[in-house]
Amino acid sequence: MLKLNGKYMPSTMTQNDAKEKILLFWSGGKDSALALHHLIQEAQYEIVGLVTTFNRDTNTVNFHGIPDSLIIDQAKMLKLPLQRIFLPANCSNTEYIDHVGKILLIFSRRGVHNVAFGDIHLEDIRKFREEMLVPLEMKAVFPLWGKDSKEVNNEFFKSGHKALVTSILKEKLDPSFLNCEFDQHFVNRLPKEVDPSGENGEFHTFVTFGPSFKMRVPFSKAIAIEEGPYLVSLMKEP
C-alpha cells in the first residue's frame, strides 16, 4: 500500500514489475530446458521469451537435427514467446555477434537486460557470451554453472523431463547411441572419456516433455545424415 495525502492507496506495482526481465537462449535440448526449470523456480526473474538460432540454409538448430517447426512447438507447449534468428551456414563469431546482437539490442532497449544460457563449465564459451552482451548493456546468467555433469543429469531426470538423443560426435560415439532416450541407461553406456552431460559437444538432445510443458511435443524420426563431425537424426513433425 502507498500513503498519499494521509490516505493509503493500493499499489499499482504488480509482482512481475518487481522482477528482472530475462531471455533464455533455447537450443531445444536438455541443458536449456533445465536452465528454464531453474529460472522458473527463482523469484528474481520474469522470463519474457526464448531465443533460438538456426542455420538459415536448413532451418534447423546446428548439429541438433531440430527443425524450426519443432522449436516453435516446444515454445507453444511452454507458453513462451520465441525469437528465431537465422544465421548463415558456417557462421563466424563476428557474423554471429552481428546477427544476434542486432536482435538482442531491441530487447535491451525494451528493458530486458538479462540473458540466460544453459552452459555448465566451458569457460571460453562463457567468456564469449559475456563479452558479446557488454556493448548491449546486458548481463549473462548461467543457472547451471559450476554444477557437476552427473548432478545436472540427475536433476533433469528427477524433474520429469524427457529427451531424445538426436546428434552424436562420430569420433566419440558409435551409431548405437543415436535416437536413444536420454536416461540413466544411456549415461551408463557412455565411454569414460565422454562427459555425462555431453558438455564438450559429444552429443545433443531434443526435449519432448518437462514439468512446464502443457503436453508432450509430438515428433517423428527421419533419416540420419552426416553434418560436419556429427551424425544427426533429422527430426520432423508427425
Image (tube, rainbow, N blue to C red):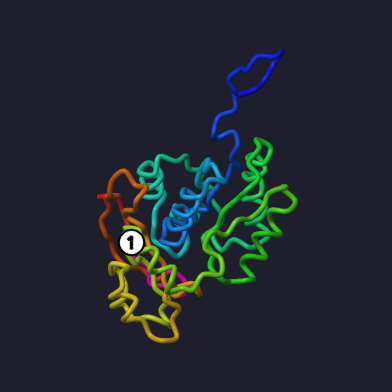
Q: Residue furthest right?
A: 135
Left or right? Give the position of 29 relative to 179. right
Rendering quarter of residue 76:
top left
* Residue 146, image x, y percentages: 56, 70
User: Residue shown at 41%/67% (left/top)?
Assistant: 204
**Circle 1 residues within 10 Å: few <14, some 14–19, many ≥20:** many
Residue drawn 31% across the image and 81% down it: 189
Badge 1 marks a residue whose secondary structure is strand
Magenta-colored segment: predominant secondary structure: strand
Does 227 appear above or below 37?
below
Task: Name the residue type under label 1.
Answer: Ala
Residue in the foreground of this view, choosing between 136 and 57: 136
The total of numbered circles placed on residues is 1
Place of residue 128 in the rendered image (x, y in percent of width and height, measured from the top left): 66, 63
Identify the residue shown where x is 46% and y is 73%: 149
Q: Residue 228 appears at what percent x and percent y?
A: 47, 72
Looking at the picture, how far across and down is residue 4, in whole percent? 69, 16
**Magenta residues, start to end:** 227-234
